Image (spheres, grey):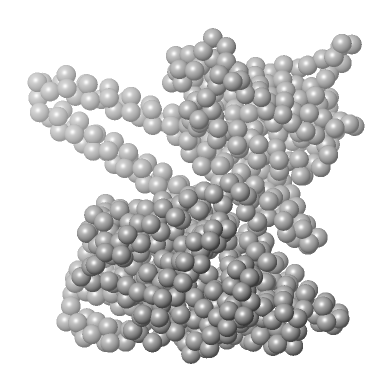
Amino acid sequence: MKNTIYLILLFGLQLPSTGQIPGITRQKTVDSLFVLLKNSKNARKVDLLNQLSLNLAPRSFDSGFRFATEALCLSKKLNYPRGKGIATFNLGNSYFFKSDIKNALTNYLSALRLLEPFEPAKEIGDLLYQLGSINQYVRNTEKMFDYYNRAARNFLTLHDTSAAIVVYFTLGCPYYYKLQTLEPIDPFTSGEVKKMMDSTIRYNNIVLDYYLKPHADYKWAPVEAWLANVYNAFGCFYQAEGDSMALDYYLKALEQARAIADTNIRNFLEGLMCANLGYQFYFFWKNPDRGYDYAKSGIVLLKRINRYDITAGALSILGRIELDKGRFRSAEKNFFQALNYSDTFLFRIDQIDEPNPTFRLAGVTQLRSQQVIIFRNLVRLFELTGDLKNALLYQKKLEEGMSLQMQDELTRQVIGLEEDHKDVLKRQEIAGLVRDNELRRLRMNQTRILFAGLGGVALIAFLVFVVWIQRKRFRSDQKALILEQKLLRSQMNPHFIFNSLTNIQNFILTEKPDKASIYLSKFAMLVRNILDNSVEEYVVLEKEISTIENYLELQKVRFSGKFDYSIHIADEIDTDTLKIPPMLAQPFIENAIEHGIKHRETPGHIDISFSLKDHVLIFEVEDNGIGRQKAHEIRILKDPEHKSMATSLTRERLANLNRKMKEKIRLEIFDLKNAIGEASGTKVTFGIPLSK
């Protein structure tokens, strides 16, 4: 029942655009821009081309892409950096409205790198808002909150409070979005619920305070519509908490919706609130007659507008009520109408006049989740009526729908991971070019100083010495980066990735979506941690432990029943502040599993411990495998060409780190033996000075 409670709540929270990104094409605006373009040139022409691309993108990918490309080429020719950044932003918009998220995200990140020198600016605020919405779509929650908050700061700096309030309202929505879209396939933990609810209520209060005060101009929607949305959000929040205040807020939302002058907006919000109240009165407030009347009234209002997805949600609620009352024929009729409205929505989505640019992405995603719930209700309906043939048919549709959601979620997260990593590498490349330019500038200065006469000899010698030191450090940093990348490849080897994805696929194919979701979440977290850690010289111990735990948990699924592990942390260690070089022990943990424990006849054990001794962090990895010598013999028999580089790479990496330190990090490897002198495992010990 929990899934259906939130069936259409979030649809009422759809947002208008923050201003820059239109969700629909306005022909009058386009016509006036074409008139101005005829006599324009240089930077003015670039700006008009960008405006045309922006306004045409929602209707025509080709037109939006063509004008953005023309603006980009002219900007490069004129050396107009801001125009170049906005043109790249518009290329991203063209892909965004084509639902090509990968290319949209690539261009948005490129645009941000180009436009950051001009921050704060209206275009940057709108770009950050788009990046926030896409990162919500690819489930990168940390990035989503970062981009949305940066967008709000941009708008507040520009004194555009209305736009900032829209962003704050958006920041209150991720809880409802995930609850509605992902709950059927990825249940929440109690910790996630509490964290998201705290965030939601904080931002909702900011928005409510703003709209309860009079303002000269309420942008994008009448104040009653905003208040209806905010009260509805509070109703959702308190309903999830089981608080009776939910009813007061739902009724306030309905009151505000009925006060809206615009007929379409009024029908939309009043119909939505009635449908929500119908469900709550029927199933939670034990007033079935009132609940049924509200649900029916909501459908009558929603059928007057072209938001077929909302109407489908309301019909699904009425079908659920009819099913509970035992009116199977009426329930079946409403469920099938809901499916028909869903299909109509997908067919006519480009014709819907919706100012919110994220409408297409969010609408389609939420509709898929809604269809899963309808299929589940139809299975129950046909089981109750004894129609086992149709029950089996819709059980298959249910499984297909859930499988499609799982695959879609995996694809999104992979896109987010890939583009994040590319952005990090690109920023590193740009930083390297800046350093190279600085070196060239210093060399030119040296040449000028050399010709200034004998009086500048001492200064020139000093500058040469400085440049030499900088180049030496630069080479050291480059070598460290190369080692980090080699180590990253050795840690995330293709066999591990392939086996992990195969396990995810097996869980989906064997109808274990819960296990697949948990495994996918751990896999995505591990990949993100390793990609993040690969560009950091030191990370907090807590993050390193999390990476190790995720890796071991995934390996436990891969080698089911083959080993267990334990992690011991001394009480005096503060894992939130103490920093260590990342991913030191992972190659040795992998060796312990692949070459030691894997060949045991009985389950093995890996023990990881952290302790302090004389201001040195002692980091130990101990296994009870077959030992290095025997593992080496087996490896030669099976694959004589194989060369393990993990240990040598780690030693190179430590040598490079130690060149910068007075107190060195030490690495020791011990072959363990039992009482009769036989190999009984391996112990790897790192000694990391606390001063570093």
Quadrant in the rendering for residue 106: bottom left
Quadrant in the rendering for residue 599: top right
Of the pair 524 and 490, the residue shown nearer to us: 524
Residue name at image x 81 percent, y 60 percent: 510
Pinpoint residue 260: horizontal percent, then vertical percent.
36, 80
Pinpoint residue 7: horizontal percent, then vertical percent.
59, 71
Of the pair 531 and 445, the residue shown nearer to us: 531
Side (left or right) of 182 relative to 428: right
Side (left or right) of 635 relative to 182: right
Pinpoint residue 341: horizontal percent, then vertical percent.
59, 85
| Residue 576 seen in the figure | yes
Residue name at image x 50 percent, y 25 percent: 578
Of the pair 687 and 311, the residue shown nearer to us: 311
- In the displayed structure, would residue 171 be above or below residue 531? below
Pinpoint residue 585: horizontal percent, then vertical percent.
63, 28
- In the displayed structure, would residue 143 be above or below residue 331? above
Quadrant in the rendering for residue 263: bottom left
Residue name at image x 48 percent, y 14 percent: 663
Residue name at image x 63 percent, y 77 percent: 288
